[in-house]
Image (spheres, helix red, strand yellow):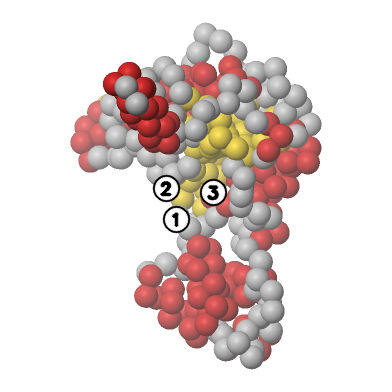
């Protein structure tokens, strides 16, 4: 083998190793038929304006609306809003706020499962990618499906770019909001930004004694006000928590006797975590059902 052949052989080996290290090629057109849910992704190593794409979620959550207990009013409102949306009637962007683990995100996922057969699709967007919202809206414009852009666990610090981008996407762009897109967001903060004692210094007193918010306060509430529908979630009472535990234990196939015997353990589990939330109830049910002796363990498990 001469020197040229050796060089070419080494070059081929080097290219083969480089190709193995590269991420898979990104399809130009989203694979709409592979899933009802998608994530907005950025290809590793791509520049700021390249390599962005919709990735199908092949194993999406299968939670149903009936699985969500003791949030009846919130469930009714978001279900009605989503029904209006898929029926091409006027509907609002939705902000779900309140106590952690009470079903905010699960309610949005359950809406997807409830209305996917009617053309509903979900696109999950991380807070870091909110500046891409105009690109996402342009990508789905003209599609026959109805798209909910899902922003989970939102909170912003002052000066973050995503805050302004979301405000514009909700209601502030010179372009009309796309007919087939809504934004559903969850947050533990009602106004999505930290509230400080110093904000109160911006309030002023009018001649009639009324309080008028200053610019700082106005800025902090302006984003949440652009959501047409607000849903608030609150910590569960003890009996509500135990009802949710019982629901999930039944879904794992536990008998009424096993469910009754689990009550004391369920309360201790919640006490250790300092929360009686739906998430804590679900975690306890998985632990309890999984530890049952094989001879009495549930025969089927569903999530």
In this orientation, which residue lies closer to the viewer: 198 or 69? Answer: 69
Check contact, mark 2 vs mark 3: CB within 8 A: no
Which label's residue is closer to the chain start, 2 or 3? 3
Q: Which percent across, then down, holds residue 97?
A: 48, 46
For the residues marked 1 and 3, what is the alpha-carbon distance in whole angstroms?
A: 10 Å
Check contact, mark 1 vs mark 2: CB within 8 A: yes
For the residues marked 2 and 3, what is the alpha-carbon distance in whole angstroms?
A: 11 Å
Numbered mark located on residue 100 in the image:
1
Can residue 299 be seen? yes
Classify mark 3: residues with Cα within 10 Å, few (<14), some (14-19) or many (20+).
some
Label 1 element class: loop
Label 3 element class: helix
Give the residue at mark 3. Answer: 105
On the picture, is 159 further left or further right than 277?
Answer: left
Q: Which percent across, then down, holds residue 250?
A: 67, 75
Q: Residue at x 69, y 84 (%)?
A: 255
In this orientation, which residue lies closer to the viewer: 80 or 62? Answer: 62
On the picture, is 24 further left or further right than 194?
Answer: right
Which is in the foreground here, disc 2 or disc 3? Answer: 3
């Amino acid at each position: 083998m001469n020197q040229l052949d050796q060089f070419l052989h080494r070059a081929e080996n080097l290219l083969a190793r480089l190709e193995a290290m590269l991420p898979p090629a990104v399809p130009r057109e989203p694979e709409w038929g592979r899933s009802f849910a998608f994530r907005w992704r950025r290809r590793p190593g791509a520049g700021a304006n390249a390599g962005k794409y919709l990735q199908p979620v092949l194993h999406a959550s299968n939670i149903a609306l009936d699985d969500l207990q003791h949030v009846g009013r919130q469930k009714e409102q978001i279900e009605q809003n989503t029904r209006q949306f898929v029926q091409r009637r006027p509907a609002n962007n939705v902000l779900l706020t309140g106590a952690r683990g009470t079903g905010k995100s699960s309610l949005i996922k359950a809406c997807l499962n409830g209305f996917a057969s009617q053309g509903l699709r979900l696109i999950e967007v991380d807070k870091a990618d909110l500046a891409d919202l105009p690109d996402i809206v342009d990508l789905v414009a003209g599609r026959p499906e109805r798209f909910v852009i899902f922003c989970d666990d939102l909170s912003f610090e002052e000066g973050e770019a995503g805050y302004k981008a979301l405000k514009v996407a909700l209601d502030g762009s010179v372009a009309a909001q796309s007919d087939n897109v809504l934004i559903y967001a969850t947050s533990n903060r009602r106004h999505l930004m930290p509230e400080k004692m110093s904000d109160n210094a911006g309030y002023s007193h009018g001649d009639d004694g009324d309080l008028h918010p200053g610019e700082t306060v106005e800025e902090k509430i302006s984003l949440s006000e652009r959501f047409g529908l607000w849903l608030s979630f609150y910590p569960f009472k003890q009996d509500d928590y135990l009802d949710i535990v019982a629901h999930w234990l039944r879904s794992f196939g536990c008998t009424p006797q096993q469910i009754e015997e689990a009550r004391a353990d369920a309360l201790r589990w919640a006490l250790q975590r300092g929360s009686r939330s739906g998430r804590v109830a679900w975690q306890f049910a998985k632990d309890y059902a999984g530890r049952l002796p094989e001879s009495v363990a549930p025969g089927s498990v569903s999530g």
